[in-house]
Image (cartoon, grey):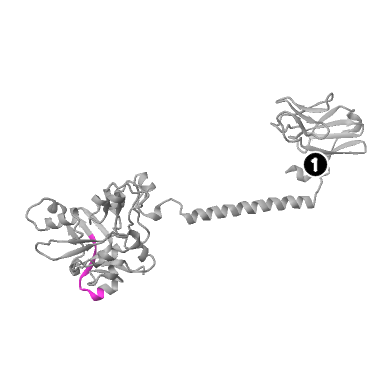
Amino acid sequence: MSSPIDPHWKRDFPVRSEEDGSVARREFTKVLGLTSLAFLIGTFAAAARKLWRNVSPSRTAGVPVASVTEVPVGAYKLFRYPTENDPCILVRLGPSQFVAFNQNCTHLSCPVHFNAGTMQFECPCHQGFFSAADGRPLAGPPRRPLVGISVSIRKGQVWAAISEAQTT
Amino acid sequence: MIDYEFFIDQSRCIGCQACVQACMECDTHRGRSMIHLEVIDRPVSTQTGPVVCMHCEDPVCAQVCPADAIKQTEDGIVHSSMKSRCIGCSNCVLACPFGVPRYVASIDQMMKCDMCFDRTSIGKKPMCATVCPSQALYFGPPAEIERIRRERPVNEFRFSQQVVKTKVNVMAGPETNVMDFDVLTFMSGGDDPMNDLIHLSVWTDHRV
């Protein structure tokens, strides 16, 4: 029987087996089973949430970013969307072709710059290159495309919008 | 079965070795008896005495084990050494006041009586108690032993300063509440015939 004044090795190695801290096989199996069950439920919950989003896509209204005349072909404009902490870049590729992307490089989140000569986005940090047309990575460390912002033109204004599924 | 207790009455032992043979047949330690049948003083007496583990409330054998190999379960049973842990140091053999644990050199491990844990844990009596013809070894309810015997069960032992309380009872005289042993007297030598007793029971194995 160990008492509080016993040296700690006696508490670590008690004579009585019920004071032993070692985990019995049954307890270990129980913990293992319950943990797997929790993971399973979590996975299904996440999947169900995703499915629910797909079934009812609710698009946000979006914000006006610039007027069509403000950005000439081959030029760009920086804006922040959906929050002040999300730098984005709007590029006019053609007379009626606007694209917008989150400015964060998908490698290590440096801001990408637009190169009108090559029609590419360049990341100066590690020489990452992205296609300006669709944001897919062309060269360098990044492997994922830039996060796209959907753009629409309404009444001479360029509107940026992001679907709710993209925010998560 | 939880209120069943073990009672030893050494004076009823007839030395038939039935308990030893029965213990040997157990599958968990086949061929080796965990009960010691001690010969008390053969030149002057035919008295023998069976020794099973007394299952101390605070087992000294387990306290001195450096390898944490001896464990006491909730029911108070002090188990034999664990094969994977026992280092064969014989600390328990020397520490036990009843001389119960034995070091078995062939397997480099201590082995001792565990009150037939495989049997008592499922409600059966220990093997030795079932075969003892004179009921020197008795396993049953305390009320029953009080009814059929005039001796009093004692489970407290004093070895000089050390008080040991045990799960197993020893039948003693009607006035006895505690078994008192003056260890120093045994160790000092002299003509006291009890010296032979302590020498025989501690240092030699009289199993035939």
Would residue A7 be found to the left or right of residue A50 on screen?
A: left
Q: What residue do we see at 37% from left, 49% from top?
A: B84
Toward the viewer: A93 or A168? A93
- For badge 1, the amino acid type reads Ile
Q: In what element is the residue under mark 1?
A: loop
Task: Return the x and y of residue B67 as percentages of the image width and height.
Answer: 34, 47
Residue behind mark 1: A162
Q: Quadrant of the C terminus of chain A?
A: top right
Range covered by the magenta-colored residues: B146-156
Q: What residue do we see at 20% from left, 53% from top?
A: B161
Give the image quarter of residue B143: bottom left
Q: Residues within 10 Å of mark 1 (few under 14, many from 20)?
A: some
Would residue B4 be found to the left or right of residue A135 on screen?
A: left
Give the image quarter of residue A146: top right
Give the image quarter of residue A81: top right
Q: Residue furthest left?
A: B191
Task: Return the x and y of residue A115 as percentages of the image width and height.
Answer: 81, 25
Would residue A152 be found to the left or right of residue A143 on screen?
A: right
Q: Is residue A91 magenta?
A: no
